[in-house]
Amino acid sequence: MSVKRVSQFFNPKSVAVIGASNTAGHAGFVVMRNLLQGGFKGPIMPVSPKHQAVHGVLAYNSIQALPKVPDLAVICTNKTTLVQIVTELGEIGCKSAIIIASGLNHEQRLALKEAAKQAQVDLLGPNCLGLLIPHLGLNASFSHTIAKPGKLAFISQSAAVCSTILDWAQQKQIGFSYFISVGDCVDMDFAELLDFLGRDAKTQAILLYIDNISEVRRFISAARAAAFSKPVIAIKTGRTQAGAIAAQQHTGGRSIDDAVYDAIFQRAGMLRVNDLRELFAATQTLALHPKLLQVEPLTILTNGGGPGVMAVDTLLQNSGKLAQLSDTTLEALRKATPQSESIYNPVDIFGDSSPLRYKQALEILLKAPEVQNLLIIHTPSALAPSEAYAEIIADTLDAIPKMARPYVMTNFMGEDAAYEARRRCAQRGIPTYRTPEGAVGAFMHLISYRRNQKHLTQTPESIVEDKLIHADDAKTIINQLIDAGHHQLSTHLATRILNEYGIECIRTEIALTPSEAREQAELLGFPVALKLVSKDIPSKSAVGGVVLNLNDGNEVEQTAFSILLRINETFPEAEVEGFSLQPMAPRAGAEELRIAIKSEPSVGPVILLGEAGTGLGFGQSAVALPPLNMNLAKYLIAAAHDKGVLKEKALPNKVDKYKLCALITRISQLVIDQPDIQSVELNPVLANAGQFLVLDASITLSKYVPDKRRKRLAIRPYPKELVTPVVLKNGVEATLRPIRPEDERAHEEFDKSLTKEDRYRRFFGELPQFNHEQLAKMTQIDYDREMAFIVTEPYKSTYRTLGVSRVLMDPDNLIAEFAVVVRSDCQGLGLGKILMTAAIEHCKKQGVEIIEGITLPENKGMIELSKRLGFVVSRDFEEGTIHMKLVLK
């Protein structure tokens, strides 16, 4: 489904209810009631062969009898009739339908999807609550309550969660731009909705309740685009294996390990919450404060010491920070609280504080420049009811312009005594929570979102280690091994591939018999490690197939015989290929790591990092999605420490984190370059200062067969196949290539090199120089939906950017907008033609139908170039601009 069709789906002018009913408790009864009571302005047409009228509205006995084609149909019949009804809707020209029915099996879902495709009907559901669009007065659902208008969009695969959220939002006075129950996602899915909502001006933040994701690559692409402009928060069920199976059965999707979902959400710049309580808190927080926090430290004002300590504990346990109050602020607070000998953060003004003292302390903190985030805690007081303090807080905040005030949230403790205070704060637009822990938890959602956004816009470090990677040589070796029938590679064969990526493996020799093992050991020198080689036994250590520190030939030979006897008893069917022998590596002072690549269904290859050991799955590792650069590798290492699967050890030589990042990026490049690699296991990897030595490696090979329905990687890697040498008119040899995140500094210098006139022609006005966040968005692009080509030349010890062309495809991949700018001192060298030709050819390969661009009449060079390249050029006299259009299909 395209964004254009989603937009049409969400803007109906008329609605038909198929299966409308006068019988209370039936879906057709509730949907008709909700549509009539919601305030929808267009025609509502019930279809029912049993009733002449439904809820007093004239009914029609069939779809064909409808007086006009509805923009939207809500199907409330049972699952056995769905295919026929969708077909009939398509025959009359209805393009959008919501399906309420649940309980469809896999075959029924497939049949429904095919019927909708043939009928050209877009579907929401099945197994869904329906759709609520408050600003249209549309309640096309069987919900028990309404949704108020607001700035939050909510999408859920669970109808029950929808009902719960709606009920809670009513009590909290929280409204929605769109409230969407997607159910089984037979047609409309999260990716398309995120593309629409990410561009929707009525939506300031997006919340998701996810059971499973089927099209991971499309989801990440759409979520990342949306998260760049507004908060996207998700709760994902199925953290346990049993929960994942239940989620899979609920919506019919594929099961993905929960640790991989963590990696998906982080890579997309989203925030994940753990449960409904946290989702409620996140919803309230985003409804009242959807923008990104500027700083992280929190100040706490309380009239009770205990609740203040609870808040501090929760804050610090979740990696939060307390604000440092200035001497000026502390002195003012001491004067306002004379009975206190010492004031610090949290600011405790004691339980006997009158409303006046509360007001004085609050005013001091609101004016303090170091207070950017403030939590106000109030415990019930005999001096005045809690609602009096709520009014003081609201009135004091109203006296300060919104742009000048800190982010403020409140916690009124208690139940009956605090209810009215919390209600008044919510009415005045102030986030309020029942407990200190809940308030701090909600605040940390904003902090986590801020940190994820910083991850999206950090400039990666460049590494100049491409000379260590020989991808073509590795490809040749892999083909040779597959042709020779090798699919499960042990260390001695895996080493040949790994060495081509600068990954050092310990010397390994192979022996076919115990006597050969003795001979090889004597050539290697003692002590040695002896390991069984058998593709039929994945864990050699579990069967005693790995023996270390053998010190003479007799010991090696006898140990090999013992291993064979043991395998003959425990795994008589296993094929034993022989033994591998390695010199014992010095492990003293070294940290032992495990780095692996696994293929996850519907996601593709993922990278795991943890401590060395056997039988380590996703739960014992930090997980990341390739491709990785230096920054992303750094986050993977940090995640491993945070998760506790990689612990800092008191070693004489600390692990060189920079070189570890470089190693991880080369492993990432290995999985990108070599699609025939299904899995990699490096366990252990000895890390000693800046040296990394693989002691045991395993690689699984299988000839990769491209699948048109699903890309191999969850994120499109850097398209290095588009890197091309070019020669400019002045004879200078340069490089044409796609932009990459590491180009930010060079792009900043390029932007500064443009004259005022060139910037005006490019941006249609006088703009300041781009800041870091803007430059990050220009260089950290999603190659699936946009492209920026740059031409670079060597300059001093690095390079400089000479020009850039950009094409931004719409989510439907039909129209691309282009722009070109050339360095002011490099014009006339043919750069414009090089850059525009690259952009056009890329759009052709992507299947784009039309390329469009706009420029000013004075930009004569761009106008003439576009004409030579086949663009149709026209002038918009009203806007004073030139429109350029090239039809590719």
Image (cartoon, rainbow, N blue to C red):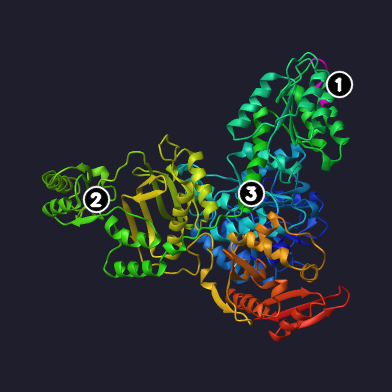
Q: Earlier in the sequence, mark 2 or mark 1?
A: 1
Q: CA distance from mark 2 to mark 3?
A: 45 Å
Image quadrant occupied by the N terminus? bottom right
Q: Residue at coordinates 59% horizontally, 60% vertically from top-left? A: 741
Q: Which residue is under mark 1?
A: 356
* 742 on left or right of 673: right
Q: Which residue is under mark 3?
A: 454
Residue type for callout 1: Leu
Q: Secondary structure at mark 2?
A: strand
Label 2 close to label 3 by CB (< 8 Å): no
Report x, y in % for residue 457. 64, 53
Res. 315 visible in picture: yes
Using the image, determine if residue 92 lies above or below residue 356: below
| Front residue of this view, candidates 66 and 609 | 609
Q: What span is colored magenta in the figure?
A: 382-390
Q: Secondary structure at mark 3?
A: helix
Question: Which quarter of the figure has residue 68?
Answer: bottom right
Question: Which quarter of the figure has residue 79?
Answer: bottom right
Q: Which mark is residue 582?
A: 2
Q: Earlier in the sequence, mark 3 or mark 1?
A: 1
Report x, y in % for residue 398. 87, 36
Report x, y in % for residue 35. 76, 52
Q: CA distance from mark 2 to mark 1?
A: 78 Å
Res. 577 visible in picture: no
